Image (tube, grey):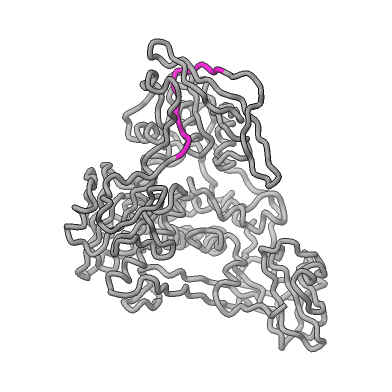
Amino acid sequence: MHPTRTEGPDYYHKVVDCQWACPAHTPVPEYIRLIAEGRYSDAYMINWKSNVFPGVLGRTCDRPCEPACRRGRVEDEPVAICRLKRVAADNKDDISSRLPPPAASRNGKRIALVGAGPAALTVARDLAPLGYDLVLYDGDAKAGGMIRSQIPRFRLPEEVIDEEVGYITGLGMEMRLGQRVDSLKDLLAENYDAVFVGTGAPRGRDLDLPGREEARANIHVGIDWLSSVSFGHIDRIGRRVIVLGGGNTAMDCCRTSRRLGGEDVKVVVRSGFEEMKASPWEKEDALHEDIPILNFRVPKAFTHDNGKLTGVVFEVVEAQYDDKGRRRLMPSGEPDEHYPCDDVLVAVGQENSFPWIERDIGLEFNEWDMPKVDEVTFQSTRSGVFFGGDAAFGPKNIIWAVAQGHDAAVSIHRYCQGEDVQDRPPPGFSLTSQKMGIHEWSYDNDISNDARFRVPQRDKVESLKDVRLEVELGFDAGLGFSEAQRCLNCDVQTVFAEPLCIECDACVDICPVDCITFTEDGEEEDLRGRLNAPSLHLDQDLLVSDKLKTGRVLVKDEDVCLHCGLCAERCPTGAWDMQRFTLEMTHATSMTGGGACQNR
């Protein structure tokens, strides 16, 4: 194999699996160490710079970082990264003095932001300090978008939304809340220098089944119903409720129903339990609240009596797979099933809706009636019009909207400065030795053996009485410290210097997971099979040195390294060093007019 190239940011960034997996590339180990030190405000600000909504995401994020967590490779469960983010948010001091001040002068450019959800708010957060005149439009009376309208208050208290949205709007922008944009053509005629569209995926899919029209009064589209509950327009539901769908919206619908009078609430899903799109913890929460989930049932008709909903008829299906592993749901041969109910909530997906965007303004749409958007710049085919969040590529999670908002803000800034939006300034990075003495490091390299700690929850009987009473209580300082200690500090890299190595094999002897091997070079497949602990995960890189004095090479399997530092402690020549990798993602606020990075 060729020696591993570690000069740029990508190699060591990928080793920090949680940060690599996070769409916003939040420096997870760094803020977890700060939590362990009790420096909650510092931990919060690291999050705020990267993911903008730490308190919101600490309760609601879809956690792409956690399946990637290295801790999950050495034991059953990863570090509770998401809930530790909440620890920082819940325990911080007043951080208002640490926020960017409103721009002292304007730069003469006006930007329209359509939709006040997480993507547009991220763009606003990044552009406001640079002196842009921002005008934020939203049809709702309060900013927040789907964060406010679609996530139940028992998961996300309104005061958390108000606080973190307020940090952004306080940077200085014109808020036109309660004002819908009904024509992009008219908006463009107002001579904005750029327009960002972050309107989300506001339309829930419906089911056109027999009985749908007749029983319309008691059949509700899930996201619309959740929005009505959030804004106080709905405060009750029937005793017997059926929720159709297997995603997170369905889980929110069924749990909300339990708090609004639903005693017999069922979730009915066409797929199997494991194939449901809902996050595992969302399904677990629903089951904990005595909500059964019935799988492999496809709705066929709504039954009614003189227009009053009486139930739903389901076909029982089973999964069959062809020779290529593709699944099809086929009739099982069992008789149809009828479940009586008073209300049905349809949560079978969301769609984008752009009736307000004219088709004659140079903005092209694809075959799915979605705007054609560049996946790097987030610019549409109409120059100066950018998209982000669910409005760009369909429904995802808040953290994706934030990441896309950051990238769109970079593009808008470059566009308004007359620069090429395709020219993306690379992220900055650094490696800093953590050595403080012969066997002493500036980080705690002792590996905690604790299993993952469970987040305390409110008593079920109490929580089901109030739709606005938060269920999860969060880690207190003690549990937060203990959970933080489970982090393996994957951003503290094992950096190897070939000229100093005497091939004594001391590092091989001390490594607790056998991830270091001195061996003859070879092709990758052959080399992976000859390591002290054979490496079968091809998506995880190998660190391969240049040839050493004996002609052998050093190979380190990054997949299972615990970053414990024992190799560096044992090495008699200092060939190994533990160096903290820091990545500075390029945001609009870290660019000068010429696009170079600067430290703030």
Q: Quadrant of residue 128?
A: bottom left
Position of residue 572 in the picture relative to residue 320 (left or right): right
Quarter containing the C terminus: bottom left
User: Which stretch did the figure color magenta?
Assistant: 338-349
Residue 96 image position (x, y, % from top left): 34, 59
Is 370 placed above or below 427 here? Answer: above
- In the displayed structure, does residue 501 sit left or right of residue 150? right
Is 590 in the magenta?
no
Q: Nearer the viewer, residue 42 or 285?
A: 285
Q: Is residue 83 above or below residue 575?
A: above
> Against 321, is 218 above or below?
above
Residue 325 placement (x, y as % from top left): 68, 45
**Which is more toward the observer, 320 or 415?**
320
Indicate the quadrant where residue 490 lies: bottom right
Residue at image x 66%, y 26%? 332
Residue at the left extreme of this rendering: 190
Q: Could you tell me if residue 177 is visible in this image?
A: no
Rendered-image quadrant of the N terminus: bottom right
Side of 575 where 215 appears, left or right: left
Q: Position of residue 563 (x, y in %)?
A: 68, 67
Q: Is residue 344 magenta?
A: yes
Q: Residue at x 51, y 33 (%)?
A: 245
Give percent across and percent down for residue 311: 49, 17
Q: Residue at x 55, y 53 (%)?
A: 64
